[in-house]
């Protein structure tokens, strides 16, 4: 079992928060003495504060800059598909 304290700000991680959960891509945006403000990228983007001591079942990997770039292009292009304007 790991904890949020191991994660570095501004890095992207693939994690499994609980055993048998789906994988989650997350990024730490803010780190304080005891907590971290985390962005989670799933079907929808969510944000929340986590204690550094909160558990993570598994940290699968730290994404490389190249992997983050490719993921960003795919994620945000796919997101735009939901917001296309109608031609009226």
Image (cartoon, grey):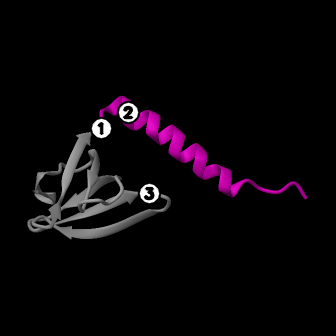
Q: Which residues are magenta?
A: 63-88
Which residue lies most toward the front here?
A: 20
- Residue found 14% across the figure and 67% down from its top: 54
The residue labelled by disc 2 is 67
Image side of residue 65 versus residue 60, left or right: right
Q: CA distance from mark 2 to mark 1?
A: 6 Å
In which quadrant will I find the N terminus? bottom left
Q: Is residue 3 left or right of residue 44?
A: left
**What crowding class fits label 2: few (fewer than 14 Cα within 10 Å), some (14-19), or many (20 or more)?**
few
88 sits left or right of 71 in the view: right
**Mark 2 / mark 3, whichever is N-terminal:** 3
Front residue (pair 3, 76)? 3
Q: Position of residue 84 (x, y in %)?
A: 73, 53
Cβ–Cβ under 8 Å for marks 2 and 1: yes
Q: Disc count in the image?
A: 3
Q: Is residue 37 magenta?
A: no
Whole-percent x and y of residue 51?
15, 69
Q: Earlier in the sequence, mark 3 or mark 1?
A: 3
Residue carrying label 1? 63
């Amino acid at each position: 079992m790991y904890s949020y304290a191991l994660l570095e700000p501004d890095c992207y991680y693939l994690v499994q928060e609980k055993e048998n959960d789906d994988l989650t891509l997350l990024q730490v945006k803010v780190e304080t003495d005891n907590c971290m403000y985390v962005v989670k990228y799933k079907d929808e983007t969510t944000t929340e504060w986590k204690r550094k001591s909160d558990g993570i079942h598994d940290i699968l990997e730290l994404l490389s800059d190249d992997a983050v770039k490719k993921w960003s292009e795919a994620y945000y292009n796919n997101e735009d598909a939901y917001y296309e304007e109608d031609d009226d």
